[in-house]
Amino acid sequence: MKALQVGLLGAGTVGGGVFNVLHRNQSEIERRAGRGIQIKVVADINPARAAAIVQNRAQIVSDAYAVIHDPEIDVVVELIGGYGIAKDLVLAAIAHGKHVVTANKALIAVHGNEIFAQARKKGVIVAFEAAVAGGIPIIKTLREGLTANRIEWIAGIINGTTNFILSEMRDKGLPFATVLEEAQRLGYAEADPTFDIEGIDAAHKVSIMSAIAFGIPVQFPQAYVEGITKLAPMDIEYAEELGYRIKLLGMTKRTEQGIELRVHPTLIPKNCLIANVEGAMNAVQVQADAVGTTLYYGKGAGSEATASAVIADLVDIVRQASLTQEERIPYLGFQDHHVISSNILPMTQIVTSYYLRMTVADETGVLASITKILADKKISIDAILQKEAAPGQDHTDLIILTHLTQEQLMLEAIEVIQNLPSMIGQVTKIRLEELS
Amino acid sequence: MKALQVGLLGAGTVGGGVFNVLHRNQSEIERRAGRGIQIKVVADINPARAAAIVQNRAQIVSDAYAVIHDPEIDVVVELIGGYGIAKDLVLAAIAHGKHVVTANKALIAVHGNEIFAQARKKGVIVAFEAAVAGGIPIIKTLREGLTANRIEWIAGIINGTTNFILSEMRDKGLPFATVLEEAQRLGYAEADPTFDIEGIDAAHKVSIMSAIAFGIPVQFPQAYVEGITKLAPMDIEYAEELGYRIKLLGMTKRTEQGIELRVHPTLIPKNCLIANVEGAMNAVQVQADAVGTTLYYGKGAGSEATASAVIADLVDIVRQASLTQEERIPYLGFQDHHVISSNILPMTQIVTSYYLRMTVADETGVLASITKILADKKISIDAILQKEAAPGQDHTDLIILTHLTQEQLMLEAIEVIQNLPSMIGQVTKIRLEELS
C-alpha cells in the first residue's frame, strides 16, 4: 500500500523533530501502522532554513498553498503556530479535503469550534494531540481511554516554562525576574515570554482539555487567566512551611452551577504526586467517577516530544481514514451533535480555598479583627502562621489558610481586611487546592 | 442504531462495576460512542450471586456457552479469571465470531499468542486494557499513544497488594508477615496471596507490556520472577538512609543482547516520581526515544477502576468493528506479521546495579577483602554504609551499592564473599535501578 503522503507547513524545531523521528523509527512505525508515512513536501517562507532541516528528504516550497493544492497529499501538518495565517491555511486544507494534524494550541483554543465544523462538513480528520502537554498522550487518554467516566475535574501543570521558573524560585530562593532571565538564557523561556508567564499558553491548553472532558465547545475567551509574574519568593517559602507547593495550574471542574475554567498560581499539598513534578516537565491529573484519580506525566515541549504526538496522530489517521465520520473518534471526544454548550462560571462564583498573606502592625487585636471579618463572610480558617516580628521591626507577616469558599465572598472579606488600620501594604491572595 | 449487545461471563466484583458504571454514565458514554452499549445476558455458575449484582438489568444464565451461542451477542466480556475454563470460553467465543474483552492478565500472559492467532483467523477484536494496571489506559498508550517511538524500557509498580505492603513496612517499620496479615484484614490482599506477593501477577502484566512495547510475542514463561516475601524491614530502612526506596518493579528493557523481562524488589531513587507512588496505587514509567520519560498513574484494581478499562474497550469496539483487520489496532500494537520473536535474556545476563547487605565480624581488613573481590569481578562501588557495631556486639552491618554490572558477575562475587571467614549469615542482594 502506498505510504501516507504528508505535507508539512513550517520547518522549525518541531518540523525537524518530525523528520528525524520518522526517519530514525521508520521501520518501527511501519511495523505498527501497517503503512509507511512519507513527508512529500515542506513549505516554509525561509527555504534555506527548511533545506537545513529537510536535508533532501522532501521537496521544499515557499508557498504553503502549493502543499494544500497538491492532489497527492493526504494530510497537512500545520506547524506554523499562532492564529493568523495558520487558521487560513488549516481551513484551506480542510476545504481541499485534506486531513489536518496540528500542534497549534492557540489555534484550537481560539478557532477550534469553527475548524471542527468545517472539517465535519468535508469529512476530514483534525488531530491535535501535540497541542496539549507535548508528548504526553493526554488527548487520546481523555477522548478514548476514559470514555466510561464522568470526568469531574482536571488539574494540569501544562506550561514547562513557568514550572521551571517556579521550581528554580523555590530551590534557590530567587525572585521571579532573576529566574526568568536565567530561563531565557537556558532556552526554557522565549525572548518574549508573555504567553507563558501570563498563563495564556496554559489557558489555551486547559480550554481544550475542558471541552474534551465535559463535551462542551472550546471556550478559551471565558477562561480566567492569571500568571506568575507577581509571585514573591516569600510566598513560596511560607507555602512550603505549611506543607504546600505553589504551581501554575490549569484547572477545569464540573460543578452544579457550571464549569470552572481557570489558570492561576495554586498551593497544592507537597505530598501529592503532581506537586513533585519539577523543572520543565508537565503533568495532568484527572479526577473521574469510575477510575478515580489518574495522572499523566512527561515532557510538555521540545522537538522530538512534540513530534512523538504529531506522528501518533498520523498513525491514527492511517487507521481511521476509512471510517465514516460517525465511527471516527469525534474531534472533542463527544459526537459533534452531543457537544452541548455549558456555562463557564465567572471567577467570582468559583469555589476554592485560599492562602492569604498580610503584613500587619505588631499590636494586639489584629488577628481577632481579621478572623472576625472572615467569620462574617462564613469563611472558615484551616491554619494560621504568624511570624515573629524581626528585631527592631514593628510589623509582622500573618499567613492564613482557609477552607473552601466562594471567590466573591473572599474578595469582599479582603476589601474589608485591606482597610483595617493595622494593615501594611496589600493583602496577597493565592488560591489553594487539595486535589483530592 | 441498535446498541452494542454484550454478554458478560462472570458476575463478580468487576462485573458489578461494569453494570454500575454503564448504568450511571449511560448518556455520557453514548454521547461519546455514538451508540448505546447494552449488557444483554450474564452467565455465572452462581445465579443467586449474579442476581444480586445484575438487579434485573439483564438476563441471567448459568451456562456460559448459552452466551457464546447467542446470535445477538456482539461482544463477550470474560471476567472469570484464571486460565482454565476462561481459555476455553474465550476461544469458543472467538470461534463463534464474537469480539472479546477480557480483564484476565493470566490468560493473556499465558495463552495470548494462541488467542490472538485464532482471533486473527476469525477477524475479531480481542481487547484487554483492564488486564494491566486496572484503570490506567496503559495498553492504549503503548499501542497507540507512543507509536512514533522506539521504546527502550518500561518499569512498573503494577501490583497494588505488594505496593501497599511495602509502603506499610516502610511507614511502620513492621516485618512482612505482620503487614501481610493487616493487608488481608483490610481486603488489600487475598486469602491466598501467592500470586501477588510472589510477583507472578506483576510478571503477567509486565510480560504483556513487554510484547506491546517491543513487538514480540507474549513470553511470560521466560520472565524472571522474585517476590517480596524475603524483604527485611532493615533493608527498607538502610535503602531510605542511602536515598532509595524499595518497590516491587516489573521491568522490561531492550538491550543489544536481547530483552530483559523481570520482576523483583528494586531500590529506586527516592526523588524520582515513581518512588512516591504509595499504598495500593499503580504507576508505569516508560522510556522511549522520541518522547523521553513518561509516567502513568492510577488505581490498578477495584471494581469501577477495572470497569472503566473494560468499558473503554467496548467503546473502541463500537468505533473499530467496521474496519478491516489491517486497519484495526493490532492486538499487540504491531501488525501481526511484524510481531518478531526476540530472545528473552536469562537472568544471569541482565545488567543492573546492586544493594548488598552483609553482617560481618567487626575486625580490620574485612572491607578490604570484600572490595577486592568486587574489583576482581570489575564491579565498581557507588556507596558504602558501615553501621557502628551495637554496644557489646562484635559484628556490624555493611551495605554496599554498586554501579552497573552483569548479574552473573555479581553471583560469582557473592559466592566468594559468602565464604570469607568474617562473614556472618547470608549476603542479602537487592537489585537497584536509577530509572534515568
Image (cartoon, coloured by chain):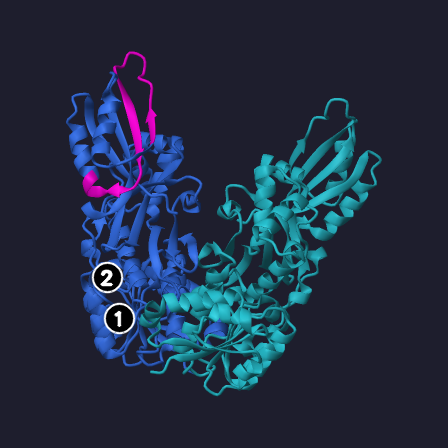
Chain colours: A cyan, B blue
Magenta segment boundaries in residue numbering: B383-409
Q: Which residue is mark 2?
A: B218
| Dot in front, 2 or 1 | 1
Quadrant in the picture for the N terminus of chain A = bottom left
At horizontal 35% and vertical 44% (from top left) the residue drawn is B163
Badge 1 amino acid? His
Q: CA distance from mark 2 to mark 1?
A: 14 Å
Q: Which residue is mark 1?
A: B338
At horizontal 57% and vertical 39% (from top left) the residue drawn is A171
Badge 2 amino acid? Val
Indicate the quadrant where residue B237 lies: top left
Asked if one can make out residue A311 in the rendered structure from this viewpoint, the answer is yes
Q: Looking at the picture, tell me which residue is in the foreground, B52 or B356.
A: B356
- Specify which label sits upstream in the sequence, 2 or 1: 2
Q: Is residue A373 left or right of residue B383?
A: right
Q: Looking at the picture, tell me which residue is in the foreground, B68 or B412.
A: B412
Q: Residues within 10 Å of mark 2 (few under 14, many from 20)?
A: many
At horizontal 19% and vertical 64% (from top left) the residue drawn is B85
> What element does badge 2 sit on?
loop
Q: Is residue A138 left or right of residue B205?
A: right
Asked if one can make out residue B28 in the rendered structure from this viewpoint, the answer is no
How far across and how far down the image is residue B240, in percent?
A: 39, 33
How far across and how far down the image is residue A83, in percent?
A: 64, 71
How far across and how far down the image is residue B318, in percent?
A: 39, 76
Q: Chain of mark 1?
A: B
Q: In this figure, what is the number of numbered marks?
A: 2
- The image's mark for residue A386 is none
Q: Chain of mark 2?
A: B
